[in-house]
Image: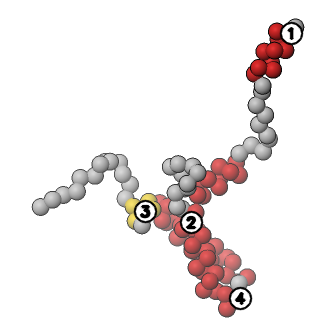
């Protein structure tokens, strides 16, 4: 008899690649969006609407390609929380040259 030994003891249980907490959040948020916006969708487009919303919710919980160890929804939160002011790098050599001239 062989037993699988987990490499990480603190590993969280996953279903379909999602942690249990993320799976519950996914289900609740998709049901919330589906029920709130259902009245604004024509009955002919109800099935494509359900598929699109469920697909978008699954996409939000997939790992982000640009931010390692983050999900897409976390990347969106980081994007909206960043400072809107621009960053301008100082030219270090220009600063040193102006100090030498003085």
Quadrant of image for the N terminus: bottom left
Disc 2 to disc 4, how far (Cα)? 24 Å
Q: Are marks 4 and 1 in contact (CB under 8 Å)?
A: no
Q: Nearer the viewer, mark 1 or mark 3?
A: 1
Q: Quadrant of the C terminus?
A: top right
Q: Which residue is mark 2?
A: 59
Q: Residue at x 78, y 34 (%)?
A: 88
Residue placed under numbered mark 1 in the picture: 101
Residue 98 screen position, x and y as percent = 84, 14
Image mark for residue 58: none
- The residue identified by callout 4 is 42
Q: Residue at x 82, y 11 (%)?
A: 99
The Cα atoms of the two marked residues, 1 and 2, are separated by: 57 Å
Crowd class of label 1 (few under 14; some 14 to 19; many from 20; radius 10 Å):
few
Q: Is residue 101 above or below residue 46?
A: above
Q: What kind of element bears circle 3? A: loop
Residue 20 at least partly seen: no
Q: Are marks 2 and 3 in contact (CB under 8 Å)?
A: no
Mark in the foreground, 1 or 2: 1
Q: Earlier in the sequence, mark 4 or mark 3?
A: 3
């Amino acid at each position: 008899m062989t037993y699988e030994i987990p490499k990480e003891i603190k590993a969280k249980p996953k279903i379909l690649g999602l942690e249990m907490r993320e799976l519950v959040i996914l289900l609740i948020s998709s049901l919330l969006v589906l029920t709130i916006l259902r009245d604004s969708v024509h009955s002919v487009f109800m099935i494509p609407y359900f598929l699109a919303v469920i697909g978008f919710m699954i996409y939000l919980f997939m790992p982000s390609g640009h931010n390692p160890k983050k999900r897409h929804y976390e990347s969106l939160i980081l994007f909206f929380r960043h400072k809107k002011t621009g960053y301008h790098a100082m030219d270090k050599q220009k600063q040193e040259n102006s100090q030498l001239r003085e």
